[in-house]
Every structure is written in structure tokens, then in C-alpha cells.
Image (tube, grey):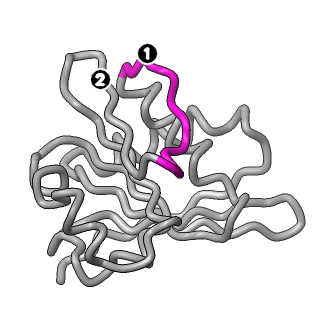
Amino acid sequence: MQLTFSHTEQLPQVAKSLIETFPDERFFAFFGKMGVGKTTLIKELCAFLGVEDNVCSPTFAIINEYSSGDGEPVYHFDFYRLKSLDEAYDLGYEEYFFSGSYCFSEWTEKIEPILPEHYLRIDITETDGIRTLVATPVDE
């Protein structure tokens, strides 16, 4: 799936399209440069899932847990500050990654060796104010 967008007003539709196109996906692995809009899109994905909590990047906490509209947990990771995979092990990542709950991961390249065997890879790039999102299911 490939989508292009240039305004944040388009993000609710982008989020809706991702969830509806990939209804069985639970682990969304985001890739893209700083400032490309990963966190902003994750906010919209959470809103689509009925999260009413304040969704913000867990840069310092590494993980935020929200509650979806049906009371299910939604996990939001930001691995930017990780210095080694050992830190992910210390978080008990397996408990989250394999919970069956939605997991949205930023700076996923820092934890690629421990990703689930199946996940949705979301690459976001930006050129001249136009963002391109490519979503690809991955089976390793």
C-alpha cells in the first residue's frame, strides 16, 4: 500500500486506511527520518482506535500505554534513546510485542533483530512537503 499526503488534515483518513486495509496487523513498525511525522500519524491511529489519552512520543519513557475505545491496551514505543538491545530486553519487550494488542514502534531500526516474525513495516519519506507512506506486511 502506498499513500501520499501533504497536510495533517489528511492524517485521519491515512490512519483509517491503514487500520482498515490491514485489520489483522497489530505490530506497526515505523521507519523514517526525524520530523517526518511518525508520532503525528501514531496519534491519528490511536484516535481512530478510540484512545482518549494524550498521545505523545515516549522519547524518555520509551513506552507509553494507552487505552483504546474498547478498553484494550495500545502500546507506543520510541526506541530513539536506546543504546543497546539489552535495554529492550530489560523493558520486557516480549510482553508487549506478543500481547496481541496494537503496538506502534518508532525508531524501529534500533530493535530490528528482535522484531516479531510478522509485522507491518511503515516507511515514511518527505520530499518538498509531500509525504509518501509505504506499508508492507513483513513475514520473516
Identified by mark 1, the residue type is Glu
Query: Which numbered circle lies on residue 130?
Result: none
Q: Residue at x 73, y 58 (%)?
A: 35
Q: Which residue is mark 2?
A: 68
Q: Residue at x 18, y 41 (%)?
A: 101
Q: Residue at x 68, y 37 (%)?
A: 10
**Direction from residue 35 to residue 39 in the image, left or right:** left
Q: Position of residue 99 (x, y in %)?
A: 10, 47
Query: Is label 1 in a helix, a strand or a loop?
Result: loop
Identified by mark 2, the residue type is Ser
Q: Residue at x 17, y 83 (%)?
A: 140
Q: Position of residue 51 (x, y in %)?
A: 39, 22
Q: Which residues are magenta?
A: 50-60
Choose top left, top right, bottom left or bottom right for residue 49: top left
Front residue of 139/71: it is: 71
Q: Say few, some or many: other residues with alpha carbon within 10 Å of mark 2 (under 14 / 14 to 19 / 20 or more).
A: many
56 to 93, vertically: above or below: above
Q: Which residue is mark 1?
A: 52
Of labels 1 and 2, earlier in sequence is 1
**Direction from residue 63 to residue 27 in the image, left or right:** left
Is residue 112 located in the magenta-colored stretch of the structure?
no
